[in-house]
Amino acid sequence: MCRIFDKFAGPSSKDHNCLGCNFDDLTEQISKYLRMATQNPTGFDLHHLFAMYAQLLNFCWERMTDVFDIIGVPDGYRVRHFAPFIGARRWANFFKHPKTFGWVVHHPHYTIENTTEHQEVTRDLAKVRIVDGEFLKKYYSADCKANAGKLRGEFVGFEQSTVVVLPDVVELTSQVCSCLAQFVKMITENPVYVEMINDTSTIENYFATVACESETSSANSAAT
């Protein structure tokens, strides 16, 4: 994210780029959360930790889409190059607005995809209802209204035997980092995007102004 700041403001410039600064603050928050979650000193359950992670990733995605809207990035390009963030958004929607799942399913089992436990609890697919990325794409995506009336029927007979298969966090995080690198490259190497973003997110002579205000404040304090 510092590459955004340096592109628009420059490491020795007196200008200040808000976009790079704010993205750096958010990604630092995500990084700190991951370190905390790895240690898990508070004893949160698996799905509690992942739910909060999905929300943080969605915060980041919301800001990225704001930038995409400003510079006019087509929806198709977003889907092709930022699918991991779109998937994380669906998980955030699922935990925030579970819909029928929230009042029909009793004590769902949470597991992580491609683990031994996942293979064990999903051994007989006829006996469990699987809630995974594909399920969320059908019922918790931005264009899922056509399937809204079918969601309740998915859990009939599986009220006590639903398994929520969470993504592999390590793999997801690696994919997210690749998306962030693509995002930075896109908005810092396209001259049209650079001009559009620079006009709206860079404060010229910011540090010169801050220095002037600091000197004035010091002078007033000394006079007092």
Image (tube, rainbow, N blue to C red):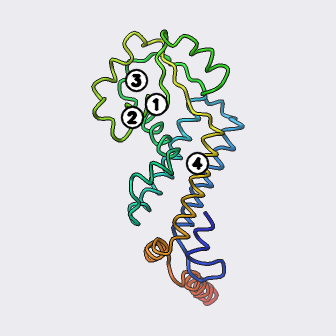
Q: Residue at x 63, y 55 (%)?
A: 28
Precedes in sequence: disc 1 or disc 3: 3
The residues bearing labels 3 and 2 have C-alpha atoms spaced at a distance of: 11 Å
Name the residue carrying label 3: 101
x and y percentages locating residue 31 in the rendered image: 65, 50
**Which amino acid type is shown beneath numbered disc 2?**
Tyr
The residues bearing labels 1 and 2 have C-alpha atoms spaced at a distance of: 10 Å
Q: Nearer the viewer, mark 3 or mark 2?
A: 2
Between residues 10 and 210, which one lies in front from this camera angle?
A: 10
Secondary structure type for disc 1: helix
Q: Is residue 122 above or below residue 174?
A: above
Residue 140 numbered tag: 2
Q: Residue at x 56, y 84 (%)?
A: 213
Residue 121 numbered tag: none
Q: Residue at x 66, y 39 (%)?
A: 170
| Quadrant holding the C terminus | bottom right
Q: Is residue 206 above or below residue 20?
A: below
Q: Nearer the viewer, mark 1 or mark 4?
A: 1
**Which amino acid type is shown beneath numbered disc 4?**
Val
Precedes in sequence: disc 3 or disc 2: 3
Precedes in sequence: disc 1 or disc 4: 1
Task: Using the rendered view, name the quadrant where residue 65 is placed.
Answer: bottom left
The residues bearing labels 4 and 3 have C-alpha atoms spaced at a distance of: 27 Å
The residues bearing labels 4 and 2 have C-alpha atoms spaced at a distance of: 20 Å
Q: Nearer the viewer, mark 1 or mark 3?
A: 1
Name the residue carrying label 4: 176
x and y percentages locating residue 27 in the rendered image: 59, 55
Task: Using the rendered view, name the quadrant where residue 109 is placed.
Answer: top right
Name the residue carrying label 1: 134
Say whether marks 1 and 2 touch (CB < 8 Å). no
Neighbour class for label 1 at 10 Å: few (<14), some, many (≥20)? few
